[in-house]
Amino acid sequence: MLRLGVDLGGTKIEAALLDEYGACSVRRRTATPAGYEEKLDAIADLVAAVEAEAGLTAPLPAGIGHPGSINPRTGLMRNANSTALNGHPLDQDLARRLNRPVRCANDANCFALSEARDGAGAGARSVFGVIAGTGVGGGIVLDGALVPGADGNAGEWGHTALPYMTPQELAISPPCYCGKTNCVEAWCSGPALSRDHERRTGETCSVQQIALAAKTGDEAAQLSLDQHEDRFARALSNVINILDPDVIVLGGGLSNLDGFADRLAKRVADWAFTDDPITQIRTPVHGDSSGVRGAAWLWDGAN
């Protein structure tokens, strides 16, 4: 049985077909347009293209991964950093546009589901999937099933407060786009790392540039990375204290930093409410394809 997944990202839209074993038979990507109707058109074009390439004659149900969440009371999108989506009934509009049933889920939830199904969390009873890049998000999978939460916001640790803040951090208290201050996202995202480095050094650098400078012995860059990893570990300690997952899988651009997962595992031990953390912190098996794979697995029997 083939499953169709679509990952609606901020810069790209990807559609793919998976077989029952998780093998991808067809995959296509396109740049994400700005407008809402244009996004729907792009998804419809991609779906038509992958189904035509696979020689399908009947439409498959579609799983859709997207930023933000659908408000269960109003049916409208909210909290998406792709703001053109907010205020629209995305699932209903796509069901009509694609002429088939659809299931929608937050992109971090899809990432977590993919890695729990046949990735870095395969075989684990509880998996927390982390997206850490431009923003910070998360998703929870228990016994192979996605946990969306009563309000559709389970796993949104990026909009909890950074714990165990220092006086220096409290003096900075960076604002978050959500309207609050000191969110994990405001401290632990890729742009947050760049802003923190600039505050201390006056240098405007990307995460990749900071990491490269640290490798070549730049002490200021190394300090920026060390402080960022400590904050990230503090934030993950809350996840471990509340959920106590078997596995945390790190996704997003920050997961590509050399040794990031191993260093976090060591630092978390200083903050989590346990003398010896058992939770494994791992890098993803499927990389940036986990989003579309997880969207396809939304039509698995457990979800």
Image (spheres, helix red, strand yellow):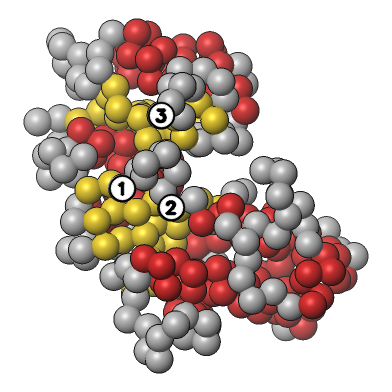
**Marker disc for residue 72:** 3
**Mark 2 in CB contact with mark 1 (< 8 angstroms):** yes
Residue at the image point whose x is 60% and y is 16% from the top: 35
Instruction: Give how far apart the Cα atoms at labels 3 and 1 are.
Output: 14 Å
Question: Where residue 113 sits in the image (x, y, percent)?
Answer: 29, 48
**Marker disc for residue 155:** 2
Residue at the image point whose x is 16% and y is 16% from the top: 56
Residue 282 shows in this picture: no
Question: Where residue 272 sits in the image (x, y, percent)?
Answer: 47, 80
* Disc 3, SS: loop
**Marker disc for residue 20:** none
Q: Which residue is mark 1?
A: 147
Q: In the image, what residue type sits under mark 3?
A: Pro
Q: For this view, does 208 lie left or right of residue 80? A: right
* Disc 2, SS: loop
Q: Nearer the viewer, residue 294 or 244?
A: 244
Q: In the image, what residue type sits under mark 1?
A: Val
* Disc 1, SS: loop
Instruction: Give how far apart the Cα atoms at labels 2 and 1 are.
Output: 9 Å
**Mark 3 in CB contact with mark 1 (< 8 angstroms):** no
